[in-house]
Amino acid sequence: MHTAILQAQALRALEAAHADATPSLMERAGACAARIALEMLEGRALILAGPGNNGGDAFVVARLLKEAGHTPVVLFAGDSNKLPADARAAHAAWMECGGQCLADYPVEHFGLIIDGLFGIGLARPIEGPYAEWIERANASGAPILALDTPSGLNALTGQVTGPTIRATRTATFIALKPGLLTGEGPDFCGKLDLCDLGLNVGNGDGQVVTPESFRACLKPRPRNSHKGSFGNVAILGGAPGMAGAALLAGRAALRLGAGRVYLGMLETLAVDVAQPELMLRSPDEAQRLASVLAIGPGLGQSPSAEALLAQAFDGGLPLIIDADGLNLLAKTPQLQRKCAVSPAPTLLTPHPAEAARLLGCLPGAIQADRVKAALELAKRFSAHVALKGCGTVIATPDGRWFINTNGNPGLASAGTGDVLTGMLAALLAQRWPPLEAMLAAVHLHGAAADACVATGDGPVGLTAGELIDPARRILNQWIAESL
């Protein structure tokens, strides 16, 4: 499975290094896309060709479809003499094989629309006739195959700023790009097909998270085990009126394998009747008994909550900060300094609004480049970061980054972040390294949501607590498969 993700600089370097390849990269891209188009094609194809190299890919696809016995219609409003050299040659080859180009969008209904308007070089909103073509293509009801990236989507950031093709499938070339996997990208790409063009991209700039990312940690438990073998999690939070958040995190930690789970509740509760194995303590006592701390679920932002977070930094234990723990961190410079110099592993799990508070910007700036934002958070706070959302981005203090592509909109409900915190705490308690624990918890969280949808229990109305048992089942399945 291809999991490497490349940014613009690495993509351009690969293209330049293979500029004289035979067949050319454009021919290879067109051939791969044409094979996908033939799988999708029912009726006649309309091919939208742009004024750059993406248009050149489109001309290659058109020629190959014609050679396969089809009669594609090509829409091209540019000046062929101003096309880049490879695209100009592709246009000439299309014309030489008897092809034609229309300048006006046809009235005819098509069985497939192929989007070859703009590729990864586009950095501005699409205007003029191209914007009209996009709107008509989207409204046509025909399946759409996008070449490299849906026109209008920033393939490097996942941001949409104007009219954008909403593709059924996207044939992306050389390597995966971050913007196809996070932010608004997945809603516009449809099914992703990678055409690597025969190039070796190595490990890439980033990686897609899969179970292989943490395979080394998927080990069966020794038969000679006891509860002390699997760590003590303390979850600090649960202020009055918000006890449920801490309870969800605690239940997730327990069922994902932590040996003992202590809830350091700000609201005094005698017992969790639904999960009596959880041990409810004062925050101070829970922290004293812990080998891993998680702070934030239902914490609130009271002075006592702030004091708990300051104390947590002084404990020297692996520390997960979520929810109001992140909000307290964002508004308290002294806590930020503690975080940045803490010798123990620190893991932050913000959603975009929390990330914006931590970086002192608006959420829109976070979403405009989610990889950049996650890397900045990891660097500034010397922490492993999971920037939650569509295509959660995981970043490390040393500059590595990953994108998780599973999960679904069922996770957009209250409490799912608390469950993620509990899962992450359980893996840390079982002595998983911070990065592998973060990757596994995020991927498991998404896999559990997908499992719920597969059985009809979502995405609409999926609740946070429903994720826990599927996550336990999937984790045990992964361990069994690793043997």
Image (cartoon, rainbow, N blue to C red):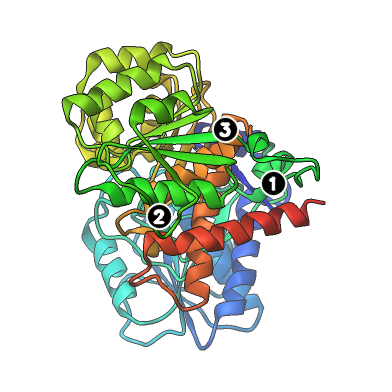
Q: Between tags 1 and 3, which lies in front?
A: 3
Q: Report the residue at 66% width, 41% height from top.
A: 214
Nearer to me, 136 or 410: 410
* Picture quadrant of residue 437: top right
Q: Is residue 52 visible?
A: no
Q: Which residue is mark 2?
A: 185
Circle 2 sits in a helix, a strand or a loop, which is it? helix
Give the spatial CA distance, label 3 vs label 2. 25 Å
| Residue 23 spot, x, y in % from top left | 71, 52
Circle 1 sits in a helix, a strand or a loop, which is it? helix
Tell me if mark 1 has few (under 14), some (14-19) or many (20+) residues whose alpha carbon lies within 10 angstroms of its own: few
Circle 3 sits in a helix, a strand or a loop, which is it? helix
N-terminal of the two: label 2 or label 1?
A: 2
In this view, 57 is above or below 404 = below
Query: Which mark, residue 212?
Result: 1
Q: Which residue is mark 3?
A: 435
Tell me if mark 3 has few (under 14), some (14-19) or many (20+) residues whose alpha carbon lies within 10 angstroms of its own: many
Q: Are marks 3 and 2 in contact (CB under 8 Å)?
A: no
Q: Report the residue at 58% width, 46% height from top.
A: 209
Kind of residue sitting beneath label 2:
Gly
| Residue 332 spot, x, y in % from top left | 22, 19
